């Protein structure tokens, strides 16, 4: 079982960026703990601040991996290109958000990618990633 985690813009600053919303742990510190919980699953990680690079990565793994956990950051609310990319590939994609976007500003209430995804998890902090993996394993 191979799962790719893809993090979008500004998520390289987790732990530093608005800790009241996103917590004080970096993704680099969380990832080994996540991997430990799934010793039989190969969990790859990729982060980029660039929309086209996210699309390139999703296309690269989307025909051979078993699933993708995608936190597209703010591109969630803007990107038809990501929507099309998710539709174009073969493996299921779970949309993830650390914060509960529905409790936040109106512009975060709409996602351009949800309709193309298998499911959506938001609001559980970094645990959202684990819950997405649970969903893919099911
Ligand atoms: C986010 C929510 C988005 O609205 C925001 O632009 C992010 C992070 C989250 O994980 O809660 O960058 O995807």
Image: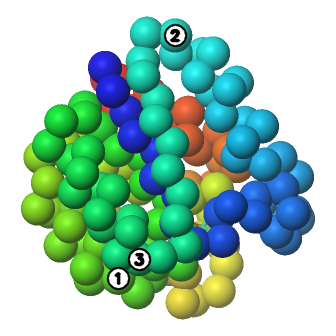
Q: Quadrant of residue 107?
A: bottom right
- Mark 3 residue's CB less than 8 Å from ligand 1: no
User: Which disc number belongs to residue 79?
Assistant: 1
Q: Are marks 1 and 3 in contact (CB under 8 Å)?
A: yes
Question: Furthest residue to the top?
Answer: 40
Q: Residues within 10 Å of mark 1 (few under 14, many from 20)?
A: some
The quadrant where ligand 1 appears is: bottom right
Is residue 99 in view from this perspective? no
Q: Quadrant of the N terminus?
A: top left
Tell me which corner region of the image, top left, top right, bottom left or bottom right, holds residue 114.
bottom left
**Alpha carbon of mark 2 to alpha carbon of mark 1: how far?**
34 Å
The residue labelled by disc 2 is 39
Mark 3 or mark 2, which has the lower sequence index? 2
Residue at the (42%, 22%) spot, across then down: 42
Q: Is residue 72 visible?
A: yes
Question: Tag 1 or tag 2, which sits nearer the N-term?
Answer: 2
How many neighbours does mark 3 have within 10 angstroms: few (below 14), some (14-19), or many (20 or more)?
A: some
Residue 94 is situated, as x and y percent measured from the top left of the image, at 36, 49
Left or right for 129, reference 32: left
In the structure shown, which secondary structural element does the residue marked by tag 2 occupy? loop
Numbered tag placed on residue 51 in the rendering: 3
Local secondary structure at mark 1:
loop
């Amino acid at each position: 079982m191979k799962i790719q985690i893809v993090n979008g813009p500004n998520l390289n600053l987790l732990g530093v960026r608005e800790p009241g919303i996103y917590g004080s742990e970096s993704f680099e510190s969380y990832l080994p703990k996540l991997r430990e919980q799934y010793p039989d699953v190969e969990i790859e990680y990729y982060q980029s601040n660039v929309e086209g690079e996210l699309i390139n990565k999703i296309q690269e793994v989307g025909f051979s991996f078993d699933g993708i956990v995608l936190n597209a950051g703010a591109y969630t609310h803007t990107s038809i290109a990501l929507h099309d990319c998710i539709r174009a590939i073969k493996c299921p994609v779970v949309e993830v958000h650390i914060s509960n976007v529905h409790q936040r500003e109106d512009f975060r209430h709409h996602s351009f990618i949800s309709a193309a995804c298998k499911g959506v998890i938001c609001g559980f902090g970094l645990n959202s990633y684990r819950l997405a993996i649970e969903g893919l394993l099911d």
